[in-house]
Amino acid sequence: MSGNYIPPLRDMQFVLHELLDMEGVLARHCADKAIDRETAHQVLDGAGRFCAEVLAPLNSVGDQHGCEYNAGDVKTAPGFREAFNRYASDGWSGLVCDVEDGGQGLPHIMGTVVSEMLASSNSAWSLYPKLSEGAYRCIRANGTDWQKDTFLTPLATGEWTGTMCLTEPHCGTDLGLLRTRAVPNVDGSFAITGTKIFISSGEHDLAPNIIHLVLARLPDAPAGVRGISLFIVPKFLLDDAGKLAARNGVQCGSLERKMGIHGNATCVMNFEAATGYLIGEAGKGLAAMFVMMNGARLGTGTQALGLSETAYQRALRYSQERLQSRSPATPASSTGPDPILSLPDVRRMLLTQRALVEGGRAFAYWLALQIDIHQHSADAQTSRDAEGLLALLTPVAKAFLSDNGVDVTSLGMQVHGGAGFITETGAEQLLRDARILPIYEGTNGVQANDLVGRKVLADEGLQIRRLLTIVRETATECLARDGSAESKVDDMGRAIAELCDDVEAATQFILDSAQLDPCQPGTSSAAYLRLIGHLMFAHFWARAALVATTKAADSFYAGKLVTAQFYFASLLPESRSLLPRIRLESSAVMNPLAFAA
Amino acid sequence: MSGNYIPPLRDMQFVLHELLDMEGVLARHCADKAIDRETAHQVLDGAGRFCAEVLAPLNSVGDQHGCEYNAGDVKTAPGFREAFNRYASDGWSGLVCDVEDGGQGLPHIMGTVVSEMLASSNSAWSLYPKLSEGAYRCIRANGTDWQKDTFLTPLATGEWTGTMCLTEPHCGTDLGLLRTRAVPNVDGSFAITGTKIFISSGEHDLAPNIIHLVLARLPDAPAGVRGISLFIVPKFLLDDAGKLAARNGVQCGSLERKMGIHGNATCVMNFEAATGYLIGEAGKGLAAMFVMMNGARLGTGTQALGLSETAYQRALRYSQERLQSRSPATPASSTGPDPILSLPDVRRMLLTQRALVEGGRAFAYWLALQIDIHQHSADAQTSRDAEGLLALLTPVAKAFLSDNGVDVTSLGMQVHGGAGFITETGAEQLLRDARILPIYEGTNGVQANDLVGRKVLADEGLQIRRLLTIVRETATECLARDGSAESKVDDMGRAIAELCDDVEAATQFILDSAQLDPCQPGTSSAAYLRLIGHLMFAHFWARAALVATTKAADSFYAGKLVTAQFYFASLLPESRSLLPRIRLESSAVMNPLAFAA
């Protein structure tokens, strides 16, 4: 039962083509990444089949087997290695990597759609290729010619995999504290020594070599983040012909036992004078690493989307099959129980899931499209505009989608009743797998601080105002739509206009109060981030409704419209509770008496 | 690390004595249950030591070992049996049972405080005695003299344990569908045949006999709930001297693998012509069982409270010890990282936990006190008044506290960052153990339907109006308090007055709309239940503030006041988002097009 996954290709196409006009946007702004509908469909259809047929059946296998540790070696769950080999040989691994590196050269947005499917079908497994993609991207952006020649093709083709090694036992968020040391060798390489923890995919048996990207500190480096450099540390060193040679001084010391994503190896990695190659400039390791981090953060949001989709699919299916109680809409004359899908409170839960899943899909794909525009637009202003929106909204996507993902997977359990708590049903694994998402790649608190501090305060609200201009156009379009009374699109327009005013006022409050009180941004940040999340969801749900109202005779569009209306009536009102939380005086949390007793 | 638990005796005393005046109330209304402060303190101190020293160290042991199944027998985790023996021999098992049955005869409120501690220290273990208490209560209320003579003392003294056997594979919520059959034997007993699932504590090695209370259907019984009778089915039959004799035809068929509470045996129970004794009247099994259910529902809320307290304690401790990043309040001249407790967003999470834990404690203990008043008051009107509030608010306590419990344990993980996801830390077990609470003893959707349908609609809002009268007195008291500007008690009074108006209007909407639309109650119910939950929390937090403002020089009361202010400023505003959800048109969820595509 728990292996079933049906790729939501229809909704994916709706978002890609009808909401985002992917084909047109790419053709206009990123000619070398252009892709026609037919090709896009073939890619997604193939990826969907791989996910449904190969990965989904391994999802509970990975959860139950976990990974086995034996003297530094890690054996993944049965089937994981074969799935990875097939993933690589079928060319999925390099989907968004450059053609010259053996990749498929597809746009980032297509990679995001495929990432959603990977996470839907097997979230723990999906972290193996996901980390490789990050390492590829980082080396491509920062590497020397030798580094690029040596490492990019094996990473793109899935011959090898990659990792990100940041966290140490005493430091996660605050990387300025890290202690791993890099001492220069005579040949220009460095000897890396230290311990890294929580390293996803740090050791495994899927591929013969693993390329670790490791933050470490040079002997003469200043304290804090400016003393951090980034190094490439392969598990196996290479001989002059590029073949695997000596084992490097890096070893998995143990595996963490954890709540979920059991199928992924979360490793303690010990570096003992391991040979590392400086990548990018000394002291600029964090900046080089951030090339991976931004993609990883959107990737975390996408993972939440994937898990949420599966939770919604399963809950809907269960509610159609489970006969229990009587719907209040059922005539008294009917006999026997109804499917629980007919109960109002169950429908409320399912519509909540659906609104969060499909709203998140539109937001995530749109953001991925901004990456393509930023990276490939020939027009400098267009590229910068996309970059600005990306910087602003990446923390929102990471935190809002991952918090929603925990809620959606938890609702999925709830719809199942008692069966939801039982392992065999598969619903509870989704929540356990989703619960890491608000934590890793920077906790959601870190995302909120990033949004308020590095994005809103740093540019004095410039990008937020740009975003509001875009969203207000949607409000105007809704209000201008003829005959919208029945569809409630005009109500949506009014709600968005009011929301934009609220966001503007909240932003001004953040800007003004930060001048007077250094503790105010951190007090307001979590609620402010959720408010911006709703701004994006309201925007995309209204756009979906604008499309759907013109085609409401078709059941797909009719359901879309009902869900849009539900979002505005039932979920967006959360924003009313966020406004007082944004304006909460910092003294309410900073008062030292709060925890004095 | 994960074994630490410090019984929050100071806050328990604050609620019992300063908020609820337990001593005075019991002396006035339940003279035979009266207890003085000193005795109460000794009981709680002893229970706290047992929980902290014996149960807490076994909590992660139970999670990791689970229960072992072998051909019908179940072995509990190492230490569980010894802990149960000590629990029974120290007299904790019969704390609230009658003295004539070998119990301690203490009031229900004292049992609730001890239940909180049991759940805090070892939630899975606590289900073994908890189910016995339910069986005791049911037999005491409904049993024949022989049944009482035979079963009450062994249940009260912990010599035997009990269970509730309701759910079957095809029916949980909708018990009218159940199929287990009871065929009369010639000796007046019945032969029970059928399969029950999700039976907590159904089989184990803690005690030599297990008394199952089983819902089943007589051969000539009508369909639906009126055909259900209740039976006592002991694991071992008794000889004429009351000694254990033949094994009865009931056996554990298997154990469920589940998300949490691994230390408790969740059993499939197979009854094959097992000897059962009818308890209460034939066809009135549900009513007899409900004597257990109401206590079990408040017990589930109390379990959530207990898990939440532990999650809060651990998160607070971690935040004091973990050095990372710099507080915005720290002078630029200071060096080194600060404890994360100094960060505004971490403090926000901890204050959210604290406000939900302590608000829940006041609500749960007060409700338990209503049980004592209802059962023991000599004045019939006083007893009926307490019964009315109990009936109204038991579903609120079950659902509101259990949903909050999931949030509080999840926040506890979040404060821990990456460590929160790691099993060893112990934070994630609390969330896994808490996640069953919104599901069992009637899902929270069932509770919401019970509140709206059987409580508010059935008495046309009578009890809600009584409750509003009580809460409005608190508002009046807050507004009348002199010099309250700094403490913000006057703001609290205004907020409560407004909230009471909102509840009144929402209740009227429920009453009016139900006349016209049978689907409206189920559409509004979940949000309405949360609104009533906030009504209770606002009431008790204001009462706490009224006490604390008079003693704010003491750090305990100062922290209380800060937390009350935080509740009103940051958590109560959720009610603003609940009002539109209550008024959501039923067509928004019942529209058949929502899930048609």
Image (tube, coloured by chain):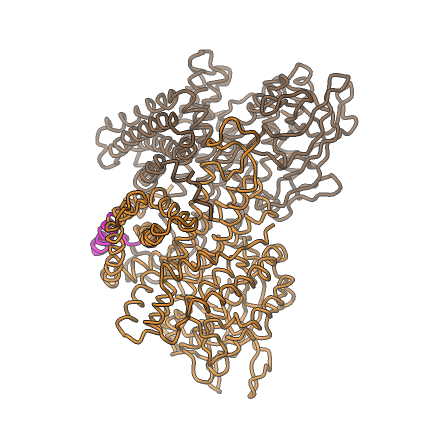
Chain colours: A orange, B brown
* Residue found 59% across the figure and 60% down from its top: A53
Which of the 4 image quarters holds residue A300?
bottom left
Residue B274 drawn at (x, y percent): 74, 27
Which of the 4 image quarters holds residue A166?
bottom left
The tally of labels here is 0
Residue A273 drawn at (x, y percent): 53, 77
Residue A428 drawn at (x, y percent): 55, 48
Q: Magenta span has A34?
A: no
Query: Where A121 falls versus A29 (above or below)?
Result: above
Q: Which residue is farthest top?
A: B379
Query: Where B482 falls versus A257 (above or below)?
Result: above
Depth check: give the residue in front, B505 or B541. B505
Magenta region, mostly helix, strand or loop? helix
Query: Where B164 falls versus A368 (above or below)?
Result: above
Compared across the picture, whether B348 is left or right of B288 comes to left
Q: Magenta span has A508?
A: yes
Segment colored magenta: A498-522
Compared across the picture, whether A129 is left or right of B209 comes to left
Q: Is residue B312 visible?
A: no
Query: Where B422 falls versus B51 (above or below)?
Result: below
Compared across the picture, whether A425 is left or right of A108 comes to right
Residue B479 drawn at (x, y percent): 24, 28
Q: Is residue A493 visible?
A: yes
Q: Quadrant of the C terminus of chain A?
A: top left
